Image (spheres, coloured by chain):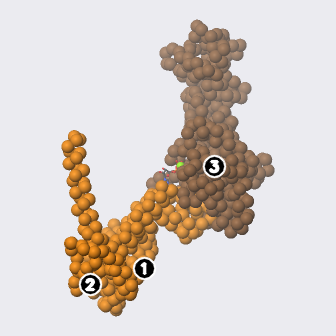
Chain colours: A orange, B brown
Amino acid sequence: MTKSTRIFMSVIYWAFVVYLFVPLVLMVVMGFKDSAFIGFPIQSWTLDWYKGVFQDTEVINVFIYSMTIAITSTLLSLVIGTWVASFLGPYKFPGKVIIFAITCLPAVIPGIISAISLRIYARFLDIEPGMLAIILGHTVHNVPFVALVVMARLATLPKSHIEAARDLGADSLIAFFRVTLPYLRPALIGAGIFCMLLSFDDFVRAFFLGSYQPTLPVLIFAKLRSGMSPEINAISTVVLVMTAILGIWAERSMRRMNKGA
Amino acid sequence: MDQQGRKAIVHIENVSKSFGQTKAIDNLDMKIMAGEFVTFLGPSGCGKSTTLRILGGFESPDQGRVILDGVDVTKQPPNKRDVNMVFQDYALFPHMTVGENIAFGLELKGQQRGEIDRRVASLLDFLQLSGFRDRTPDQLSGGQRQRVALARALAPDPKLLLLDEPLGALDAKLRGQVQVELKDIQRRTGKTFFFVTHDQEEALTMSDRIVVMNAGRVEQDGTPEDLYYRPASRFVAEFIGETNLLEGTVRGSDQGAVIIDWKGHSVYGSANGGQPQTGSSVAASIRPENVICLPQRPANDRALKGRIVNRVFKGSKTTVDVQVDERDPLIIKAHVDPAVAHQFADDTVWVTWDTNRLAVLAG
Ligand SMILES: Nc1ncnc2c1ncn2[C@@H]1O[C@H](COP(=O)(O)OP(=O)(O)O)[C@@H](O)[C@H]1O
Ligand SMILES: [Mg+2]
């Protein structure tokens, strides 16, 4: 590579980084603006918007509501996904490919289609729009991700590890909990964080399956419609910081554990 | 009970096992005596692992039974059997420390914490792993991992220890050392070891008894010396050690010795299973180190005249190829003392052997 192409490549790279981060930086900066209107110039700064967010019981309740949905649907997805993976992974049986395809389908169906069909299905099952419906919707959507990640990890577990556990006196259940599950841990943590973020971030399903109580993205959408204000920037910044911390921590701990395994 | 008054700890009773068309084990019937170091020896794919897995409870036989210490365990799952296995890849649990790995079987037996700690400590000490209790398996060398796997399998005090080629992953130099260690551990614990290998040298080094397998069947069952000097079949003779295989027809007998016509030369040997029929074609095996080379014709008439066509100095011995016949080159390999190898300077030698050393094999 010549010197000029190298410079050219790095200019492109940095241009891309700027393109990626400018909106985020703008969003964060505007959250500190002491004015109800978003945009330059900024004459004075304030922390009032943030104070407002942390004192606004509605925002806090919605946040808790969204977290509850994210955590519950993630736990459900992990349990079901692991169960599907341990069922689909090691055994060979007729129709396995079809079952596998059906399992993966919810991950690739367009969100709007999936949201509408889930809404119809929930009504059919007599499930009221609301938390339960959203949790089930997110679980259906997230199970394939868990199943795929767990299956990939499971495929690398030597059969002899399970046999050794059985040999040393473990029945198949104990062997699963004491050998298979610890082995799957990095995969479960990774998949779990991914599910949490997917659920927390989801707008379409939450919008279609929700009741009057909004999730955070739905709330932000509602606030947007009544006018853009730096309060939205403040909420978004808090969410951004939290997800970034979660993501980085997950990535680090997964790397650490992968090295240990 | 066998001759030494030991009781059979395991009886594999007419066991057969097939995988689809492949017959992995074909009507195997054998006993293992308490305190024995038995080696299952055979080429790759002859059914060794399958036999071990049937004993461990990981496969169930199509036919036959497995009797462990007088109890039929054929239908018992692995966790109910008083048998432990050292796996070829060691199968140490990566998320547990060395100590936790060893304690695993003891915990599942429901032992008290204090009792477990004592047992783990004594095993670590016994296997020279004392400083490694809190390490994880990825912080150990191959030899250390092998010892941890052994400690883990010994911990629950099984009636029988199964070892599936546990030295295969070690480099050649370490392997020799571990062979001696393993035999020593077996002697000191008095445990019954059922060891599987395809390496005949390993089998000879460690075993009290060797069972040679070929294509799912037992070829021979005996002490290392039996197998080496009195192979029961051509397969055993060729599989174990280096040998000269002479093919010919039985000509008759002379004072208990079998006379074989080896392409026109009379050779004398002994048959284990009684005098073979005159006129039948047989193979006979003689080890190179049992072939005696002489510079002159010996007094007895049981020697063959030949010519040295190849000699290789190997330090402790010189190996020579003796061509016995000019027309139809018949070669006998022999070991001679390098100190006297110069006696055969003109390359004419007489080869002979103790009649008992030439084993006449069926077929
Ligand atoms: N699970 C299995 N499925 C199909 N064939 C098998 C299985 N296990 C072993 N075999 C076959 O049975 C024969 C004996 O195998 P094995 O007992 O592993 O031999 P060894 O340990 O002596 O190398 C081989 O031909 C092998 O391919
Ligand atoms: Mg094998």
Between A151 and B26, the one nearer to me in the picture: A151
Question: Mark 1 highlights which residue?
Answer: A72
Mark 3 belongs to which subunit? B
- Asked if the residue under mark 3 is in contact with the one under mark 1, i.e. CB atoms within 8 Å, the reply is no
Q: Nearer the viewer, residue B112 or B320?
A: B112
Q: Nearer the viewer, mark 2 or mark 1?
A: 2
Which element is circle 1 on?
helix
Q: What is the spatial separation of the Cα atoms under label 1 and label 3, in whole angstroms?
A: 45 Å
Residue B228 in percent (x, y) is at 65, 34
Mark 3 lies on a secondary structure that is helix
Could you confirm whether marks 2 and 3 are on the same chain?
A: no
Q: Is residue A222 left or right of residue B351?
A: left
Res A207 quadrant in image? bottom left
What is the number of the mark on residue B147? Answer: 3
Give amino acid for label 1.
Thr
User: Circle 1: is it few (<14), some (14-19), or many (20+) Cα within 10 Å?
Assistant: some
- Ligand 2 lies under 8 Å from the Cβ of mark 3: no
Q: Is residue B187 above or below residue A23?
A: above
Q: Position of residue B148 (x, y in %)?
A: 63, 52
- When the figure is inspected, residue B308 is found, relative to residue B224, above or below; the finding is above
* Residue position marked by numbered label 2 in the rendering: A223
Residue B238 in sight here? yes
Which residue is drawn at the image coordinates 35% and 77% (left, top)? A47
Residue B226, percent across and down?
A: 68, 37
Task: Give the quarter of the image for residue B108.
Answer: bottom right
Chain bearing tag 2 is A
Look at 56% across and 58% down and name the residue there. Answer: B93
Instruction: Decide if ligand 1 comes within 8 Å of the CB at mark 2.
Output: no
Tag 3: amino acid = Arg
